[in-house]
Amino acid sequence: MKILLIEDDEGLADLIVDKLTRQKQYIIECSNNGCEGLELAESYEYDIILLDVALPELDGIQVCQQLRDRGNRTPILLLTAHNNITKKVAGLDAGADDYLVKPFDVRELLARIRALSRRGNDILLPVLQWGVLTLDPNNCQVNHKQKPLKLTAKEYSLLELFLRHPQRIFSQSSLIEKIWSWEESPSENAVRTQIKGLRQKLRKAGIDPNMIETIYGLGYRLKKEPLPLQQGTTKKRHKTQSLMMATSVSSSKAVNFRNDTLSAIWQKYQSQYRDRIDLLQEAAIAIKQDTLSIDLQKQAVHTAHTLVGSLGSFGYTQSSQICSEIETILQSYNHKDYKVIDRLDKLLTILLTQINSPPEPILDSDRESMTFGNDEEHMPYSALPPQYKLLIVDDDFPLTQALVSEAITWGIEAQVAGNLSQAREAIAENLPDAILLDLSFPEAHNGGLELLQELNAKQLNIPVIALTARESFADRVEVARLGGKGFLTKPVSPTQAMETVASILEQSNLPDAKILVVDNQKENLNAIADLLLPWGFDVVSLQDAGQFWDVLEQSNPDLIIAQLEMEGVSGIELCQVVRNDPRWCHLPVLIISPHDDIQTIQQICSVGVDDHISFPIIQEELLARIFNRLDKERYRRQLADTDPLTGIANRRASLQRLTRLLRIAQRQDKHWCFVMIDLDDFKQINDNFGHETGDRVLRRLGQLLKQEFRSEDVIARWGGEEFILGLYDMNKDAVISRLREFLAAFRQQEFTTVQEEDCQVTFSAGVAEYPVDGNSLEILYQFADMALYRAKAEGKNQII
């Protein structure tokens, strides 16, 4: 249950928060003045508001009146030191639901909160039940077969939410909004972590861990209550699945685990890679003697192609590049060319030397999850629920073993098929949730594209990520045409590959959106709400179109559904009003009409309506049209917020997140650092090597920053060669140390110019820390800018 406490007495506020959070089921957000409290109450959804009467800026009775005038019906409990009838009457007349006089006993406060929650929520049950699992909200006790089940506060809140709404699908975003306070600012990884922790505890208690089931592409939902005869089989079925659960490891240990695993696999198969290089040398000798057969040439090309992906994935980045050049030479060679022969000899000599040396460690982000709230057990960064199944189709056995090991750390069950025939058998036996598909298979004319074509023809809707060392635009187009969801070019680290798989599996397209439905027929409003609510939409129904503008500004919807023909104002006129306002002109509008003739559709389209649906409403069609419009609008917003060259946030989009994180740091008394990064001598790079090389440098720096820092951090390009970071809960020393490590790695990056020359680039950075260097974003920006200027003046290539 989410409670907003608006109280200017910090001591009393802390006491109330302490007592309520001990009850586990309460999530408390605080404000110490009326204006801010009113803003929070209008911006977020709460179950109850605890409101002090004597507040600065705007008193509690005024806050209550304004909320009620704007249609907010959240239960309000007034708190005041005035024990007189006049104040009580004024508060209740303003719309308060109850009144509590200070000083009060906390037990009475809890009792009044429970009473208000029962009054405000018709579906509240004394005891919630799923099979033999019970949750009693009165004492926050969860029992299974009359034995207590210990849960953290977040796990308890999740379980209670699902039990209260057994038919509803909750997206990760909606769970964050309902379970976490806005000050915690968790990522979607935090949701997956808590779901995973809850499932593990359910399993240990003998409960089906997937009672909270994942609805692919949508979110999570409570599984249908089991029948008594099914309980035994459910437990047995999930016993095997539990063996595939990822072991919880800390972020730093996870990085070491990956590198140790890769090193072990490399040692195991190093001799096989030497044998492959021997085959390349055999082909080189045949070229010298002018005896290279077509079969040996094909075999050597395939071997070089395989090594491109494998060696890079094990940390031999330069070796991978060498193999790529060898592949190109072998593919195009058709006569005795002494320059080519000499070049091939040199490449093979370097290649042998390099693979006899230890590989470079695979750089990976620390993946530190920010710790929020008062959870008794903080689960480290993990990834997907373990029921996801990945099929890896690749004939490079050592590489696939590295991918399988990495998949385990992400909680993904991976199966390997060494050729297309094995892949077909695996798919026929058990459909995977995603496929990682190499495109190069000698036995098939079109390689992996052949399998992708078959999947597309059967309309199996399995996300396929292409994995290939063959950088070909034609392949990219064909993969997209056949419905592929991703394209990775070898060499790629196992971590990067699993990040892509996880991203595609968890691609939200979630219906976590607010929809304003306008219709003067109450029956239509109820029918549409019944269709949309089970999918997790927040539906705002409006029967009086005359109140449209007020409700639009209050609800801030993501999409409007309006009836074409209404009394007073038509759906077309509502759309025209929306399109005429700069703030709302991009808002998607869907018109429902009993007419589908050409004249009506032309009239609808001419005013900017995005889509049209006719009566009778078919749920599948309505959902498809809504998802389509929401996807397009999200894509438009993403383009507006993203730097097109680097793929990271732009200045405009980052400013809002920076301000929000700084505000959270101020409230929680945490460190927060603002970093300015500027590439050294970037103008010379553009002048000497061309803007194409400069763009390549900018793009690579953006990619590396995104990989090496947390998803919770703000990473943006502010223009030209200037980048910024906003790092929460890190002091200046830790940030400078981290940036120096990153700079050392970035210096090793080699960029090939148009003139086929290699160049290396450095950057300088300035760091400012809240609250040491300033209390506002503007002051921190100025301090970081001065530190950056000093770094440039003192020789560049450094962090200050």
Image: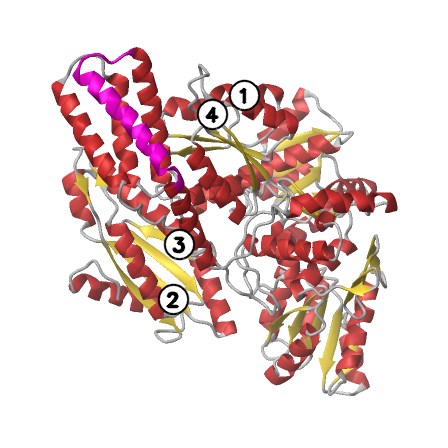
Q: Quick check: marks 2 and 1 in contact, CB under 8 Å?
A: no
Residue marked by disc 3: 715
Give the mark, 4 or 1, whose residue is nearer the N terminus: 1
CA separation, marks 2 and 3?
Answer: 12 Å
Residues in magenta, as a range: 268-293
Q: CA distance from mark 2 to mark 1?
A: 53 Å
Residue 781 image-quadrant placement: bottom left
Q: Which numbered disc flags the more N-terminal residue, 2 or 4?
A: 4
Point out the frontmost of discs 4 and 3.
Answer: 4
User: Closer to the observer: label 1 or label 3?
Assistant: 1
Q: Is residue 292 magenta?
A: yes
Spatial CA distance of label 4 from label 3 is 30 Å
Q: Amino acid at mark 3?
A: Ile
**N-terminal label among 2 and 1:** 1
Q: Residues within 10 Å of mark 1 (few under 14, many from 20)?
A: few
Residue under pointer 4: 479
Q: Within 10 angstroms of label 3, few (less than 14), some, or many (20 or more) residues?
A: many
Q: Residues within 10 Å of mark 4 (few under 14, many from 20)?
A: many
Residue 262 included in the magenta stretch of the image: no
Q: Residue 566 appears at what percent x and percent y?
A: 75, 39
